């Protein structure tokens, strides 16, 4: 009959029939009548002689805000146990903990930078190991 090339043994091309695909039926859109008519703009009120802007309408419509009432008695004196001391940080205050935490973070940052500088000065780079060119570290003993 035919071989792997898709040709018949006589050397003629295979015949592929035309595909008959019907066109899809698309219904007409159902557009409401109100969308097709011209919009109706009402006439301005007869009591207005000049056009009024939204800003003017807002300023007229806002009521006046009354002033806050004045306190009838004076405020109490501050409690010395609640007010923080004027001398600054105390051992148990949040400020003391904040300074301690940021000091520890600063020491860690400096240590990380020093470690990176030490490793890069010894010839070790992050990419040399993946390329298979890792150089051995020189070992020196302090005497």
Image (cartoon, rainbow, N blue to C red):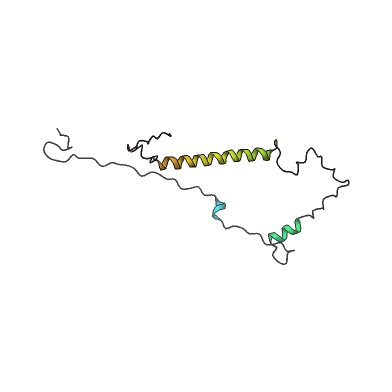
Quarter that holds the N terminus: top left
Residue 53 in the image: x percent, y percent? 69, 62
Which is more toward the observer, 89 or 1? 89
Q: Residue furthest bottom?
A: 49
Name the residue rendered at 70%, 60% in the picture.
55
Name the residue rendered at 45%, 41% in the picture.
116
**Left or right placement of residue 137 versus residue 49 in this view:** left
Up the image or down, 57 lies above or below 27; here it is: below
Residue 106 in the image: x percent, y percent? 56, 41
Q: How many marks?
A: 0
Residue 2 in the image: x percent, y percent? 15, 34
Q: Residue furthest right?
A: 72
Name the residue rendered at 44%, 41% in the picture.
118
Which is more toward the observer, 87 or 141? 141
Quarter occupied by residue 49: bottom right
Up the image or down, 29 lies above or below 44; here it is: above
Name the residue rendered at 67%, 39% in the picture.
96
Which is more toward the observer, 16 or 85? 85
Q: Residue furthest left?
A: 10
Quarter that holds the C terminus: top left
Residue 66 in the image: x percent, y percent? 82, 53
Which is more toward the observer, 74 or 80? 80
Up the image or down, 142 lies above or below 51; here it is: above
**Left or right placement of residue 15 versus residue 113 in this view:** left
Quarter occupied by residue 57: bottom right
């Amino acid at each position: 009959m035919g071989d792997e090339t898709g040709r018949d043994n006589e050397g003629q091309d295979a015949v592929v029939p035309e595909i008959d695909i019907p066109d899809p039926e698309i219904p007409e859109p159902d557009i409401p009548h109100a969308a097709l008519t011209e919009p109706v703009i009402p006439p301005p009120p007869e009591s207005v002689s000049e056009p009024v802007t939204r800003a003017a309408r807002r300023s007229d419509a806002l009521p006046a805000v009354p002033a806050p009432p004045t306190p009838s008695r004076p405020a109490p004196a501050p409690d010395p146990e609640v007010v923080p001391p004027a001398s600054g940080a105390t051992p148990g205050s949040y400020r003391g903990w904040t300074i301690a935490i940021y000091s520890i973070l600063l020491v860690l940052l400096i240590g990380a930078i020093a470690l990176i500088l030490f490793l890069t000065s010894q010839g070790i780079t992050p990419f040399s190991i993946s390329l298979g060119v890792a150089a051995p570290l020189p070992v020196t003993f302090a005497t």
